[in-house]
């Protein structure tokens, strides 16, 4: 939201009262409080009929500094609030001298100037990383009575801003106006389903605005050397989060707002759905499932979209008896084929649903100020909204979900949650404006906790569309409604990368696009992208997404990349656990892994899948693609070709390949199973060593399907000698060398004819020494 007219003037209709001078300081309870006047204080007369802004500096975690700016402190805070972690602040150091007051947390500090001009500066050690300058902090009044709090933080030369949720606009946010307001706008607009008031920059710090409501960001768009953000009301709180590496920023941000939960291993397999408005019954579903099996296409999850329930009855959690007369038996039959089951739900209750009268009677539905149930006809006739601020309503909703889990359902697609009105009253008195974005957190939490309760820890997974800060605790999320073309494929990737640098570890998208039906070439190119994503789903709107509906080659491409993903699961699941421990996404923007490489800073058509595999999807029918390899000697995963990085490349690929390169000095563990994602990853694993350089030391963990470390591989190289240590598991595996030399002799293992090294079953720790030719 813009408050200025150019660099000098205030927009007509607004009055700004800005921090211009520090008046006084207070130190107590590991907090530093500054009192800033909005006009120079040259004598006692200047303290009359003026404003005083209260700015409190505190630190919930080392390397994280909070700033709370308050105008009127008497305003009632109705909530809701983000659930944030934090301790007593005993790690904080506060000092004060004649020139400034300073609060230090870890290697991050904030200094407040005591001179005639107000300024707040954030330092990493001795390096200033950002700050709030003279007249940046402000209380704003709009003609008509609305009030806002505003802050402006400096950007330096060459500083790029990323994040702010799953945004489909340009990946670098400089020059954009970003309003944190969840909307159902598809992937082809500036609107977003998942708005997160957090950004990160290539200078190695992040900023989180602690407000679940309508935060407005001007990212170098109002003043080109500043990020301005504002909220309605009388107070504003934000946190500056230091890295200095961008991955460490995400680690600290998710320590504050919540780490992603670990989805079960089976969710990483291929999902197939009925699609949205298609006609289907058990025979149709079986034709899909059996058709996949007949064509040797591994399938792991089947999803029933909206019309598993009767039209006009959404949501009543009741199978349409006209189409599914024996749902429990059907689910049992599908599960006997080795499938997991997901069904669609939303938090809206149509008037024809039996739940409408129940909810109305017991006060479980959101109301208007006059006591009426809030209703409209958009999406479902007479639709009402479950009030998740009411614990009894949560339990009521959860009860129906438990029944479905008992029937055989393993996961829920928690659709919608963005179209939340503000002219309503909530059970707990929450501010309806702030509840607009926060509603989805309560909705997804209820569903996720039912699955966790019924199925166990690390066995719960959603397929969610909407989110706010903290939503990463309830994975998985998908990118919403995209078109079936290359442009939407690219904008989907931008959205996923943007969400990943907003604290979300897992993300998916509709392979081939949701709206319309993709040409066969788009579908096949999207298959490679989709099956090299965190999670992989075939889903559409008005047409089926079985591969043979496109052409025979699409069947072969589906088989190839699905089996590749299954074999990659030991590596992918280790990456998934890392996401839960460190907050680093599975699909990573290039600058996360290569923060020192300026060429990586603006890349949004390629990504790192974990720390070692580079993926550059192909966005053309002809197979032409341009991509960038950072420095080092990279090895193509599929062909074994080695290429020197540090430059751009233009190449052409068929439908069975794409730029898929393994980073030098990597251990990539591939599994022995290519038909399912959940298996014994350590048994007969292929431990691949890529371009291990002289002096390098590399490690990799192999987990079991519970996420526990089962085997740890450590590799070091000195000249022509490789020393390999395997600790744990005790199961046989193979070691293969890629992109660098061949083994001349081996101690502790058996050199095979193909050049690989067999390691038999062992107990404790095994040491292998390889002499290279």
Image (cartoon, helix red, strand yellow):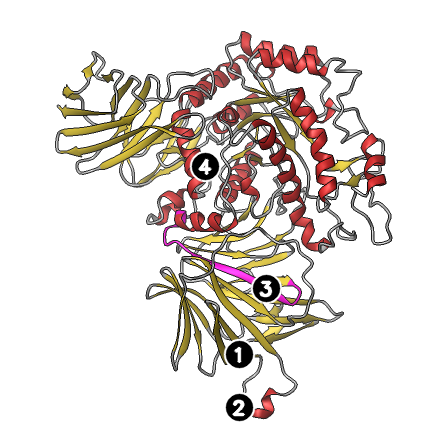
Q: CA distance from mark 1 to mark 4?
A: 44 Å
Q: Which mark is residue 236?
A: 3
Sequence-wise, which precedes: disc 3 or disc 1? 1
Q: Earlier in the sequence, mark 2 or mark 3?
A: 2
Which region shows up in magenta? Answer: 232-247
Of the image marks 3 and 4, the number of the one nearer the N terminus: 3
| Front position in the image: 192 or 357 | 357
Q: Are marks 3 and 1 in contact (CB under 8 Å)?
A: no
Q: With respect to residue 537, does 196 lie above or below?
A: below
Residue wearing tag 4: 587
Q: Residues within 10 Å of mark 4 (few under 14, many from 20)?
A: many
Q: Residues within 10 Å of mark 2 (few under 14, many from 20)?
A: few
Q: In the picture shown, does residue 46 fall above or below 483?
A: below
- Relative horizontal placement of residue 382, taking residue 8 as reference (left or right): right
Q: Quick one: SS at disc 4?
A: strand
Q: Secondary structure at mark 3?
A: strand
């Amino acid at each position: 939201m813009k408050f200025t007219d150019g660099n000098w003037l205030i927009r007509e209709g607004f009055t700004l009262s800005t921090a211009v001078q520090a008046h006084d300081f207070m130190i107590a309870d590991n907090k530093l409080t500054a009192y800033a006047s909005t006009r120079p204080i040259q004598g006692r007369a200047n303290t009359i009929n003026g404003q005083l802004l209260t700015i409190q500096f505190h630190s919930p975690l080392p390397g994280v500094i909070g700033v709370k700016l308050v105008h009127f402190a008497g305003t009632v805070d109705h909530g809701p609030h983000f659930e944030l972690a934090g301790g007593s602040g005993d790690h904080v150091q506060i000092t004060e001298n004649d020139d400034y007051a300073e609060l230090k947390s870890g290697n991050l500090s904030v200094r407040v100037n005591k001179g005639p001009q107000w300024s707040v500066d954030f330092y990493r050690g001795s390096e200033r990383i950002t700050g709030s300058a003279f007249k940046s902090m402000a209380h704003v009044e709009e003609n008509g009575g609305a009030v806002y709090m505003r802050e402006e933080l400096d950007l330096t030369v060459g500083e790029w801003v990323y994040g702010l949720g799953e945004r489909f606009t340009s990946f670098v946010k400089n020059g954009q106006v970003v309003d944190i307001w969840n909307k159902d706008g598809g992937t082809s607009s500036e609107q977003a389903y998942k708005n997160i008031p957090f950004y990160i920059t290539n200078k190695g710090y992040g900023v989180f605005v602690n407000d679940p409501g309508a935060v407005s960001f001007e990212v170098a768009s109002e003043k080109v050397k500043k990020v301005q953000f504002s909220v309605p009301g009388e107070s504003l709180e934000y946190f500056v989060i230091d890295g200095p590496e961008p991955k460490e920023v995400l680690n600290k941000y998710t320590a504050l707002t919540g780490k992603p939960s670990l989805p079960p291993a089976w969710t990483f397999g291929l999902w197939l759905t009925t699609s949205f408005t298609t006609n289907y019954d058990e025979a149709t579903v079986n034709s899909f499932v059996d058709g996949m099996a007949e064509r040797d296409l591994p399938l792991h999850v089947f999803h029933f979209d909206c019309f598993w329930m009767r039209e006009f009855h959404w949501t009543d959690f009741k199978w349409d008896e006209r189409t599914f007369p024996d749902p429990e038996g059907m689910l049992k039959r599908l599960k006997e084929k080795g499938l997991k089951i997901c069904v669609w739900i939303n938090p809206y209750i149509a008037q024809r649903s039996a739940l409408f009268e129940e909810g109305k009677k017991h006060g479980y539905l959101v109301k208007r100020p006059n006591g009426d149930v809030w209703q409209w006809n958009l999406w479902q006739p007479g639709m009402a909204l479950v009030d998740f601020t009411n614990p009894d309503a949560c339990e009521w909703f959860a009860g129906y979900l438990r029944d479905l889990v008992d029937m055989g359902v393993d996961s829920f697609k928690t659709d919608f949650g963005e179209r939340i009105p503000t002219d309503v009253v909530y059970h707990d008195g929450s501010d309806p404006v702030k509840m607009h974005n926060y509603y989805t957190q309560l909705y997804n939490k209820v569903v996720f906790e039912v699955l966790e309760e019924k199925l166990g820890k690390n066995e719960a997974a959603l397929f969610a569309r909407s989110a706010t800060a903290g939503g990463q605790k309830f994975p998985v999320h998908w990118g919403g409604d995209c078109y079936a073309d290359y442009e939407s494929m690219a904008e989907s990737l931008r959205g996923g990368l943007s969400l990943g640098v907003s604290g979300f570890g897992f993300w998916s998208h509709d392979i081939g696009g949701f709206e319309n039906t993709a040409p066969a070439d788009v579908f096949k190119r999207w298959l490679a992208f989709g099956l090299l994503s965190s999670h992989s789903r075939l889903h559409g709107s008005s047409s089926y997404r079985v591969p043979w509906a496109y052409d025979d080659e699409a069947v072969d491409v589906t088989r190839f990349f699905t089996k590749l993903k299954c074999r990659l699961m030991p590596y992918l699941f280790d990456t998934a656990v890392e996401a839960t421990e460190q907050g680093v996404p599975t699909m990573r923007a290039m600058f996360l892994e290569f923060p020192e490489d300026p060429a990586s800073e603006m890349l949004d058509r390629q990504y790192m899948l974990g720390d070692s595999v580079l993926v550059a999807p192909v966005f053309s029918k002809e197979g032409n693609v341009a991509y960038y390899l950072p420095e080092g000697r990279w090895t193509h995963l599929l062909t074994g070709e080695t290429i020197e990085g540090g430059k751009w490349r233009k190449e052409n690929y068929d439908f069975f390949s794409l730029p898929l390169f393994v980073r030098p000095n990597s251990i990539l563990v591939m599994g022995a199973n290519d038909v399912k994602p959940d298996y014994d990853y350590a048994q007969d694993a292929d431990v691949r060593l890529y371009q291990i350089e002289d002096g390098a030391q590399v490690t990799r963990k192999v987990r079991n399907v519970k996420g526990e470390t089962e085997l740890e591989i450590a590799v070091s190289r000195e000249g022509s000698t490789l020393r390999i240590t395997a600790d744990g598991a005790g199961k046989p595996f193979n070691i293969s060398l890629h992109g660098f030399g061949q083994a001349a002799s081996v101690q502790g293992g058996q050199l095979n004819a193909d050049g690989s090294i067999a390691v038999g079953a062992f107990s404790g720790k095994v040491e292998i020494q390889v002499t290279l030719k």
